[in-house]
């Protein structure tokens, strides 16, 4: 993020001691905890490593949906205000997270030993592999992290994502109106989209509701079914989950589905480049084919695309039958799933 000289953001930055990290090799992920599937993260902290706010998050629509100069400027302004309030004893911050270095993950250590730069997604990969190793790991309930507030009906302003613009669903039922500013989520102060997402990420899995304090008062939102679900295809956890679906692909847009007469909720997926001769390719799948069914199933609340549906519902060694379209005509491919594409 490089603001123009003498812009409000550039002037604000001069009020901070700035540290920039472009290599995750020596990052304390216990203190600097964020979604490592993002492209940019910013923390405003004090000398005790207590965090005032986080900035830098994304949703399924894109990596930069909630990144902008206006929102970054506002975040730094709020960070300064929180610092003044903390010094005056007006607020109490959560203690710094328990220290844990990124190299506790074996895959990160391997990258460091090769004298290569450690990327954020490689830390996310380490987190995913650690999750898979848990004895109680359930891939139908545990993979989803840093959920999108829109699943609660919170359509947020892009330049100030604490302001609700388009309340729908659960948020609307809770009485939240357009223009309300979210001040607290589950009792925690929030100043940015990343703050809201962070609190939602840490809600216990058994929770059925969450309380928001807004500029208009207290609001209790009943958490809808599948509210944590996001597209795992954009996360390391989705890439590493076994089995490999047999093809690489990209979900169809709503317009593409409509043109083909498919339902909006369908997980229809267009196969993309085959990097190796996968089991799917051996069974007849080619680049451009559109997978519309997996053993007769066309949609799932857990999966936005056919690949993730296969990863969540099958194991290595299972047989699978896909129905796909090629030039508008239906075809089938039957094959045995493998853990990896090679």
Image: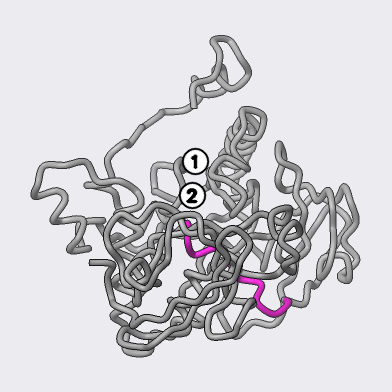
Label 2's element? strand
Residue 151, horizontal then vertical, whole percent: 70, 65
Residue annotated with mark 1: 44
186 lies left or right of 248: right
Image side of residue 274 versus residue 255, left or right: left
Q: Position of residue 9 (x, y in %)?
A: 59, 22
Question: How far apart are the alpha carbons under marks 1 and 2?
Answer: 6 Å
- Do the CB atoms of the residues marked 1 and 2 lie less than 8 Å apart? yes
Q: Could you say which quadrant of the image residue 243 lies in?
A: bottom left
Image: magenta residue range: 224-234
- Residue 220: x and y in percent read 80, 72
**Which quarter of the figure is the C terminus placed in?**
bottom left
Q: Residue 51's mark? A: 2
Query: Looking at the image, which residue is at 42% across and 60% down?
Result: 286
Task: Say if 83 sits above or below 4 in the image.
Answer: below
Nearest the eye: 120 or 240: 240
Residue 169 located left or right of residue 123 = right
How many other residues sit within 10 Å of disc 2, few (<14), some (14-19) or many (≥20)?
A: many
The residue drawn where x is 65% and y is 53% is 190
Most foreground residue, 10 or 236? 236
The percent position of residue 110, horizontal first and vertical second, equals 13, 55
Q: Could you tell me what secondary structure mostly forms the magenta stretch? A: loop
Q: Is residue 232 magenta-colored? A: yes
Height in image: 307 above or below 29? Answer: below
> In the rendered picture of this protein, how many numbered marks are placed on residues?
2
Left or right: residue 47 compared with residue 301:
left
Colouring used for the render: one colour
Of the two numbered discs 1 and 2 on the same chain, state the one appearing first in sequence: 1
Q: Secondary structure at mark 1?
A: strand
Q: Name the residue at 30% across, 54% down.
A: 275
């Amino acid at each position: 993020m490089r603001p123009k000289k003498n812009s409000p953001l550039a002037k604000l930055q001069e009020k901070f001691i700035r540290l920039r990290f472009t290599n995750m090799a020596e990052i304390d992920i216990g203190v600097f905890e964020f979604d490592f599937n993002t492209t940019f993260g910013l923390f405003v902290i004090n000398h005790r490593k207590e965090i005032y706010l986080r900035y830098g998050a994304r949703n399924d629509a894109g990596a930069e949906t909630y990144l902008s100069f206006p929102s970054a400027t506002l975040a730094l302004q709020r960070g300064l205000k929180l610092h003044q309030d903390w010094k005056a004893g007006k607020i109490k911050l959560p203690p710094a997270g328990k220290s844990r270095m990124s190299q506790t993950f074996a895959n990160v250590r391997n990258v460091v030993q090769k004298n290569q730069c450690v990327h954020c997604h490689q830390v996310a990969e380490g987190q995913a592999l650690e999750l898979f190793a848990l004895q109680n790991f359930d891939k139908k309930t545990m993979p989803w992290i840093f959920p999108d507030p829109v699943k609660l009906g919170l359509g947020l302003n892009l330049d100030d994502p604490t302001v609700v613009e388009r309340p729908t669903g659960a948020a609307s039922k809770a009485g939240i109106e357009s223009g309300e500013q979210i001040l607290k989520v589950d009792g925690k102060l929030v100043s940015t989209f990343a703050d809201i997402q962070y609190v939602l990420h840490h809600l216990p899995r058994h929770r059925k509701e969450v309380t928001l304090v807004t500029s208009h008062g207290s609001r209790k939102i009943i958490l809808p079914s599948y509210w944590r679900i996001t597209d795992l295809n954009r996360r390391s956890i989705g890439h590493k989950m076994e089995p490999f679906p047999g093809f690489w692909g990209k979900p169809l847009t709503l317009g593409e589905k409509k043109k083909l007469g498919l339902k909006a909720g369908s997980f229809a997926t267009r196969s993309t480049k085959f990097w190796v001769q996968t089991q799917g390719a051996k069974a007849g799948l080619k680049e451009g084919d559109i997978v519309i069914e997996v053993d007769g199933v066309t949609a799932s609340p857990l999966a936005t695309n056919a690949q993730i549906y296969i990863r969540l519902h099958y194991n290595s060694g299972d047989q699978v039958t896909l129905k796909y379209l090629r030039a508008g005509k239906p075809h089938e491919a039957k094959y045995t799933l493998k853990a990896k594409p090679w």
